[in-house]
Image: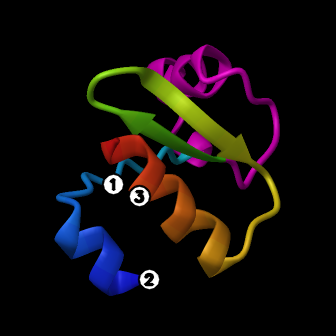
Amino acid sequence: MLDALEQHDVVPLKVDLTSGVPARGDRLKAAGGATIPLLVIVSPKDGPIWKSELYTPGDVVAAIERAEK
């Protein structure tokens, strides 16, 4: 999975809700999620294309590859 992150120029963004910064909770809501963990893959062209609370490394790699198409 690390190879896919590097190959596809993935920029990770971690939202820590324990920090007390309200804007971070807003990011979670904007992504359409209310649970932690939530992983969202965003295509540079199409915006969010995949999100899940439960995923495997294979799910993530497939979504990353789809985001580039």
Residue at the image point whose x is 60% and y is 41% from the top: 17
Q: Residue furthest front?
A: 69
Q: Position of residue 63 (x, y in %)?
A: 54, 54
| Numbered disc 1: secondary structure | loop
Q: Residues within 10 Å of mark 3 (few under 14, many from 20)?
A: some
Who comes first in sequence, dot 2 or dot 1? 2
Q: Position of residue 18 (x, y in %)?
A: 60, 46
Could you tell me how far apart the alpha carbons at marks 3 and 2 are, in whole angstroms? 11 Å
| Numbered disc 3: secondary structure | helix
Q: Amino acid at mark 1?
A: Pro
The answer to whether the residues at label 3 and label 2 have Cβ atoms under 8 Å apart is: no
The answer to whether the residues at label 1 and label 3 have Cβ atoms under 8 Å apart is: no
Who comes first in sequence, dot 1 or dot 3? 1
Who comes first in sequence, dot 3 or dot 2? 2
Residue 12: give its label: 1
Residue 37, quarter of the rendered image: bottom right
Q: Quadrant of the N terminus?
A: bottom left
Bounds of the magenta segment: 17-38
Q: Nearer the viewer, residue 56 or 17?
A: 56
